[in-house]
Amino acid sequence: MQIEKHQIEELNQQQLAAHKRRFEFTAEGVANIDEVIKKLSVFNIAIPSWALGTGGTRFGRFSGGGEPRSLEEKIEDVGVIHALNQSSNSISLHIPWDIPENASSIKALASQLGLHFDAVNSNTFQDQPNQKLSYKFGSLHHVDKAVRKQAIEHNIEVIKYGVQLDSKALSVWLSDGSNFPGQLNLRQAFQNTLESLQEVYEALPADWKMWIEYKPYEPNFYSTTIGDWGQSYLLASKLGNKASTLVDLGHHLQGTNIEQIVSLLLMEGKLAGFHFNDSKYGDDDLTVGSVNPYQLFLIFNELVEGMDAKGMDHATSIGWMIDASHNVKDPIEDLLQSVQAIKIAYAQALLIDKKALTAAQQNNDVAQAQEILQQAYRTDVRPLIAEAALRAGGALDPIGSFRKLKVRDQLIKDRGLKTVATGL
Ligand code: RM4
Ligand code: MN
Ligand code: MN
């Protein structure tokens, strides 16, 4: 199913007059409005191939109907998202959940929808049918060299798929860890991981990156071998320039100051990018901005400030991706909401009066510093996001349009009610 340009234009037309009024009201207070709109127009966030189906928990999975049955259908769904928001022009594949059997036809389909391929993700946290050795006790950190070798080869195979699709990064998340004290020699586990990653690193093409994700617990509950940003950073530093640290917002213990981690990784040139989601307790993978939008804004404050300090291009110099899953929402609606939330936080960060904030910081004027941040945070920037989408050919109201166009009904008609997408 594909959304036609004229369908979006017709819906936009009905909302145009109200939008213009709202936009002019907000734009009046923004000195560099054209620059802000331009930055918002080129800002894209990748969609993970595993988030297009209904997510499950370990207690059950309730399929929502019309889920994509193949990689082609997942790409079509990203096409729908991108047609509506003009901000999701790439897809990130998880191998082997989504193996591109015929790379050239997959690439052709994607580019017809204005999409390309973001990072490829390896999976050594599950055993696959016909797999020789088990990952029950880990993969790249395993005590048995043969298991490590199998996991290394899998990562190299993932790079090969990525090369066929013009991806430029391998993203590695390991569930490796231990469930009980004493189970593992922690130093040995780390060293095995480093050696294994070194072999994968050797196989990276010259223009590729390796993104190393960390996570404090789950599925292991005593130690995770890449458990925090320090451990990821250590690996990335030892590996070399192509390796850096990937921050998944759900992979921190409660109360962690994520914006500070982000700020320092950026300073060191070791921030690979993001897996965006939101959480209340742990790796909840909830819709971005649904629980703690202020934290997201504070992260973007550090990002904009830190990237500007280094003259980095906001849109392209690090990886922007969603990593969420949904067991009670329509996945497409959820992803549209997530992308909107990210763009809202980014727009608010662009509105911060940087000069005034620097002055307040220099004068230890704490109250004023807070006023400046919250002035930006409390600005309703949604008309700016809508204007950027409008100028790029997207919908003023992506979710409203998705509903009015009855996209899900159509997908159920085309694919059936009881379809199940690959993924978690
Ligand atoms: C993990 C982690 C990875 C993702 C898997 C599915 O918790 O966030 O990025 O690939 O889940
Ligand atoms: Mn992740
Ligand atoms: Mn996760």
Image: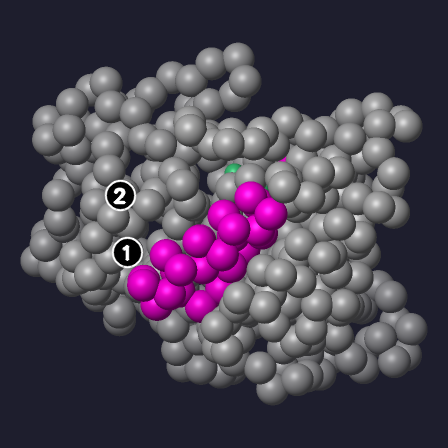
Q: Which mark is residue 414?
A: none
Residue 220 visible here: yes
Q: Which residue is mark 1?
A: 82
**Residue that appears at 74% across and 75% down:** 267
> Distance between the Cα atoms at labels 2 and 1?
16 Å
Q: Quadrant of residue 354?
A: bottom right
Start-end of magenta stretch: 149-176
The spot of residue 177 in percent (x, y) is 74, 35
Residue 109 horizontal side relative to residue 348, left or right: left
Q: Nearer the viewer, residue 81 or 194?
A: 194
Locate ligand 1 by image quadrant. top right
Question: How is colour applied across the structure in the image?
Answer: one colour
The label nearer to you, 2 versus 1, is: 2
Q: Quadrant of residue 16?
A: bottom left
* Residue carrying label 2: 71
Counting residues from the start of the chain, the first of labels 2 and 1 encountered is 2
